[in-house]
Image (spheres, helix red, strand yellow):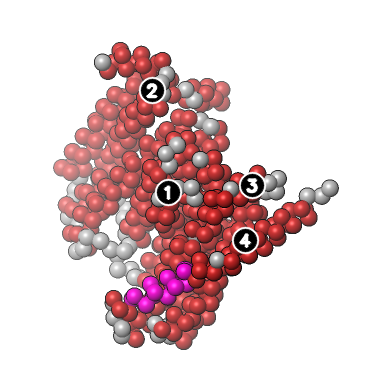
């Protein structure tokens, strides 16, 4: 097991290997994700029972929750990638960290937008300074910081390292921010809206949600692979294998 | 042969040098204070001069002002050293970068955070902050502004060589300042309501201790990258 992991790790050190293998994996993730998404959405939107309080408006959960989850795990992935890059000088880890940032930010925006659309019928307003909404907004700000820093530094190698440090610092701070925001919220507006208490969902509502969450992760992988492959092509543009690949495939 | 005295000597030499340099350019020291004063006085003009209302928003306004003023002053932290090459010399010293950065941040707090803390009661007076708020205001600034300097050192380290560093720094640092802002401003508010503020202050203290342990490491790594540029 350990040996296999080690071998995988060493292979991942080679952008060329990843470029070739991810081309093979992508269709799998794409189609499995599509099947899960179709099943989850049809089940969730058409067959799952309406919520006894919120009626049909709760169904946006099948987009809202996966995107919120993904935006958080993407940030952690970005920081872990940065850490691996800093410690073991692994090029591919930096590439993944860099290309993940816009994806995570997009997911955060999607979560905020769907949250606002959901909030309108449920709470009667597009936005409230609820703890969860606020920490999602701060997460988006953290993404903006990392992306802006990366853009500001011209030298690719140094930009990678700087962005890695910032995302690691951000990850250490995320629990503190989350905790303090929740604490602040309970202080200032006691119990107007309790989103914090998760409703126990009926299984026929919950299983489609699991489907769409898995689908989001699959499509996230496809998106991540595509962006990573683009980035690899660009960074390795002077190497023989890229020149050959371009001659064979793109021209 | 022991390295300990050498380390202490280096730190105190750096500390004195930075302090001296700071006092040689007093204008730079005053600017954040002026900014603090001006930003705070914009609120009565923009929102409402009603004393009751101003008293209510005073804790938040003063703290946001202090936070922004600190953000402006962070430019002083490494910039001149970076420009004249002293920063590179500091980083190649045999002494651990951790303590050197800590010394620089300490000076930054003495010339930026401490004056802000001292001037804050005056602003409280102008905004009609109720009686019970002054103690918590001073204490929260005393515990909070060093953390602002420490976290800011990371941002300053990352952006020191960049042309557009000034615009970038708030983007990087402000999200990290949010916990301090929340706890400090609510400490003052709780004080105004006449309730105990120990819990808030303890959190600020804990965050400070945490920042002392972690931020110089991150700032050191950031500076090494910036110098390599």
| Of A110 and A120, the residue lying toward us | A110
Q: Chain of mark 4?
A: B
Residue B7: in sight, yes or no?
Answer: yes
Q: Is residue B196 above or below residue B108?
A: below
Crowdedness of circle 4 by 10 Å Cα count: few (<14), some, many (20+)? many
Residues tagged 1 and 4 counted as in contact (Cβ below 8 A): no
- The part of the chain drawn in magenta is B31-43
Q: Provide the residue designation for mark 4.
A: B18
Q: Main secondary structure of the magenta part?
A: helix
Instruction: Please tell me whether mark 4 sits on a helix, a strand or a loop.
Output: helix
Magenta stretch containing residue A49, yes or no?
no
Mark 3, Cα crowd under 10 Å, few <14 / some 14-19 / many 20+, is few
Q: How far is mark 3 from mark 4, CA to CA?
A: 14 Å
Measure the C-alpha gap from mark 1 to mark 3. Answer: 22 Å
C-alpha gap between disc 2 and disc 4: 46 Å
Q: Nearer the viewer, mark 1 or mark 2?
A: 1
Q: Chain of mark 2?
A: A
Q: Secondary structure beneath disc 1? A: loop
- Helix, strand or loop under label 3: helix
- Name the mark on residue B163: 1
| Front residue of A62 and B42 | B42
Rendered residue at 65%/44% (across/down): B92
Instruction: Please tell me how many numbered marks the rendered image carries.
Output: 4
Q: Is circle 3 on the same chain as circle 4?
A: yes
Left or right: residue A45 compared with residue A31: left
Q: Is residue A47 left or right of residue A169?
A: left
Q: Which residue is mark 2?
A: A237
């Amino acid at each position: 097991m350990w040996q296999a992991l080690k071998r995988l790790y060493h292979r991942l050190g080679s952008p060329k290997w990843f470029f070739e293998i991810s081309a093979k994996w992508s269709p799998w993730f794409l189609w499995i994700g599509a099947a899960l998404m179709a099943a989850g959405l049809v089940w969730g939107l058409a067959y799952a029972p309406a919520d006894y309080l919120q009626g049909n408006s709760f169904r946006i959960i099948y987009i809202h929750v996966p995107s919120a989850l993904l935006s958080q795990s993407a940030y952690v992935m970005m920081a872990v990638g940065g850490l691996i890059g800093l410690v073991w000088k692994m090029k591919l880890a930096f590439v993944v960290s860099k290309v993940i940032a816009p994806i995570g930010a997009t997911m955060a925006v999607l979560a905020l937008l769907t949250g606002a659309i959901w909030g309108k019928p449920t709470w009667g307003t597009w936005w409230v300074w609820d703890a969860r909404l606020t920490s999602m907004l701060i997460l988006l700000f953290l993404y903006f910081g990392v992306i802006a820093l990366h853009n500001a530094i011209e030298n690719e190698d140094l930009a990678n390292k700087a962005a890695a440090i910032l995302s690691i610092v951000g990850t250490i701070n995320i629990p503190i921010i989350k905790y303090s925001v929740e604490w602040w919220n309970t202080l200032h507006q006691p119990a107007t809206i309790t989103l914090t208490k998760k409703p126990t969902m009926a299984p026929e509502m919950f299983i489609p949600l699991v489907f769409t969450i898995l689908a989001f992760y699959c499509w996230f992988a496809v998106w991540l692979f595509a962006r990573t492959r683009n980035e690899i092509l660009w960074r390795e543009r002077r190497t023989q294998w890229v020149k050959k690949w371009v001659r064979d495939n793109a021209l | 042969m022991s390295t300990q005295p050498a380390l202490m000597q280096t730190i105190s030499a750096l500390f004195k040098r930075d302090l001296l340099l700071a006092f040689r350019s007093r204008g730079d020291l005053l600017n954040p204070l002026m900014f603090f004063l001006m930003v705070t006085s914009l609120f009565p003009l923009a929102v409402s001069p009603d004393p009751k209302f101003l008293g209510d928003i005073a804790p938040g306004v003063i703290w946001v002002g202090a936070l922004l003023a600190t953000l402006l002053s962070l430019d002083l932290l490494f910039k001149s050293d970076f420009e004249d090459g002293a920063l590179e010399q500091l980083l190649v010293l045999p002494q651990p970068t951790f303590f050197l950065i800590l010394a620089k941040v300490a000076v930054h707090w003495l010339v930026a955070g401490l004056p802000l803390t001292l001037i804050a009661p005056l602003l409280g007076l102008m905004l009609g902050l109720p009686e019970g708020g002054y103690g918590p205001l001073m204490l929260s600034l005393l515990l909070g502004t060093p953390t602002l300097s420490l976290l800011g050192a990371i941002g300053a380290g990352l952006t020191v060589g960049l042309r557009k560093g000034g615009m970038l720094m708030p983007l990087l640092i402000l999200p990290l300042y949010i916990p301090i802002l929340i706890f400090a401003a609510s400490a003052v508010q709780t004080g105004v309501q006449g309730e105990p503020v120990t819990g808030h202050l303890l959190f600020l203290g804990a965050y400070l201790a945490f920042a002392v342990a972690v931020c110089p490491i991150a700032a050191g790594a950031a500076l090494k990258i910036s110098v390599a540029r």
